[in-house]
Amino acid sequence: MDVKGQESVKRALEIAAAGGHNVLLIGPPGTGKSMLAKRLPTILPPLTLDEALETTKIHSIVGLLSAGQALVTQRPFRAPHHTASDAGLLGGNINPTPGEISLAHHGVLFLDELPEFKRSVLETMRQPLEEGRVTISRAAGTMTFPSQFMLVAAMNPTPDGKMPGESKSSPREIQNYLGRISGPLLDRIDLHIEVPQVKFREISGGGQTGEGSTQIRERVIAARKRQHERFKSKPKITCNARMGSRELKEFCEMDEPTKELLKFAMADMNLSARAYDRIQKVARTIADLAGSEKILSDHVSEAIQYRSLDRQLWT
């Protein structure tokens, strides 16, 4: 991804890209959350022809195609400001037109400073995140627009920007700050990724950046091909993140030790039923990246690590 340091974060973003998972980046200011989010499209698989045609239709409605442009060939990256209104995000005006979440169809919707968005705005996203489409009703009529996007959000861990153990904010202030993001919305975000401060030696390490986008993208494409084969009889499901309860039972089988590990984590972390489903989906993607047909305990263990905001440290 051509970013110095943050190897654990890059690994998590690789998993997100491979399975089409929603992501929340949590870390102090200056850790590179926005930069990492903006680099995510470089490791996403290319648009298929059908995806390009759908994306082009939406962008043409609002006049976003440049002169002479026949087709959108790059996955969209939309980053609305936290002052955006419900209509700006969902779509609206007198005649229903696509909003930011539809303009991000088949791409990335990046919400920086997530707790600064109005709660009402964030709550309107729950249905599109679940169903992959948004319906807008106005006097002029009702329109439904597709909105299958990857949500990538970023936020500070506490009101003063420091990690919980270092913050001068009281537990109540931290809880009120985190409480701006509702539990149902948080449950729809598959990976909670902690973004630590980059060590000086990583910044000044002779230009070494670890793996580049090309190598990571190749693994992402290979994992997506496995999912394409898996879901070829289910055209509405394009990646692991889109699996429903029926597909989870069919494609996320585990042996007894792995089930016990997940059961223990559920009880220990007091996770919701929706979080249980998210862990299974992420574990399925980790297995795909490893080229494994079966979900193993190692895959589940790594998936559990990405539920940071469910831990006692945060609550």
Image (cartoon, rainbow, N blue to C red):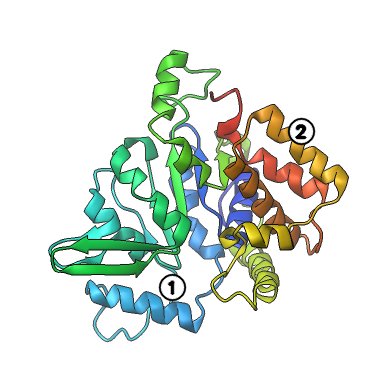
Residue 152 is situated, as x and y percent measured from the top left of the image, at: 46, 51
Report the front residue among 29 and 159: 159
Q: Residues within 10 Å of mark 1 (few under 14, many from 20)?
A: some
Q: Which residue is mark 1?
A: 74
Q: Residue at x 61, y 28 (%)?
A: 311
Relative to 183, is 297 above or below? below
Q: Which residue is mark 2?
A: 264
User: Helix, strand, or loop for circle 1?
Assistant: loop
Give the quarter of the image for residue 200. Answer: top right
Residue 28 is situated, as x and y percent measured from the top left of the image, at: 47, 31
Q: Is residue 183 left or right of residue 84?
A: right
Q: Is residue 182 left or right of residue 243?
A: left
Relative to 312, is 151 above or below? below
Q: Amino acid at mark 2?
A: Phe
Report the front residue among 255 and 193: 255
Q: Earlier in the sequence, mark 1 or mark 2?
A: 1
